[in-house]
Structure formats: C-alpha cells, structure tokens
Amino acid sequence: MSITLPGIDIPSHTIDFGGLATNDFLILLVVGLIAGLLASRFVGGTGRGVLVDIVIGVIGAIVGHWLFGLLNINLGPGVLPMIIVAFVGAVLLLLIWAGLSGGISRTGRVRRRV
C-alpha cells in the first residue's frame, strides 16, 4: 500500500527524510523538536512546550517533505536538510493553524476565536 499525493508517491512503510528513514525514531524526534521549537519561535515568538513542539515538528516534516517533493526540491541527505524541510513545513502548519484559530496576538500567542 502506498500514499499517493499530487506529484509524489510515498510507500506507507517508509518515508525518506533527507536520506534517513522514519524508523530512526530518535533522530526524527530530535529533528521534530528543533524544527518545532524554531517554527514556534518564528511564528509565535515563544515555544509551545516540548511535546507540542515535537508534534509540530514531526507533522511539519511530513508537510515539508510533501511540499518539497511536489515542487521537486531536493536539499540532499543529512540532518540539516531534514531540519530545514521540517522547519518550512512546521511554519506553514503554524500559519494555517493561526489563520484558522483567529491569528497571532501581540505577545506572539495564537489568538483563539470566541
């Protein structure tokens, strides 16, 4: 079984992030933490907590990988390209989240609609 998105076909058993497969769980968590923390600070001014930053970073890595594949952009193998791709995806994810939830306040926090 494979996941098919426009312009990209990803086998469900592995997703290759810059030469490292998802089964390397520790690296994925560290990359997710770094990318999520950087994206949270870039978009909102502060981190959102270790667990939330990891989740944002890991989901951002998937979004970034899909987007870079769709645009046919390859940064090469290694951890730094993985962090860059995850960061771009996490920023995009946070901007969509901020847009759906009411924007970003002056303090850098995402405002919630009431």
Image: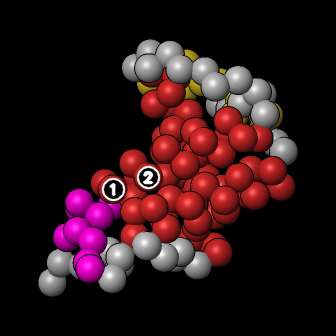
Front one among 88 and 99: 88
2 and 1 marks in contact (CB < 8 Å): yes
Task: For residue 8, say whether it is visible.
Answer: no
Q: What residue do we see at 58% from left, 78% from top?
A: 49
Front one among 97 and 41: 41
* Quadrant where the C terminus is found in the figure: bottom left
- For label 1, the residue is 95
Magenta region: 97-106
Task: For residue 89, say whether it is visible.
Answer: yes
Vertical relation: 110 (above or below) 18? below
Residue 61 left/right relative to 103: right
Q: Amino acid at mark 2?
A: Val
Residue 72 left/right relative to 13: left
Query: Which mark, residue 114?
Result: none
- For label 2, the residue is 91
Q: What residue do we see at 44% from left, 52% from top?
A: 91
How many angstroms separate mark 2 from mark 1 (CA)? 6 Å
Q: Secondary structure at mark 1?
A: helix
Residue 75 left/right relative to 39: right
Pinpoint residue 7: horizontal percent, then vertical percent: 44, 15
Front one among 27 and 88: 88
Q: For residue 104: magenta?
A: yes
Q: What residue do we see at 83% from left, 55% from top?
A: 26
Pinpoint residue 1: horizontal percent, then vertical percent: 62, 24
Q: Secondary structure at mark 2?
A: helix
Front one among 21 and 78: 78
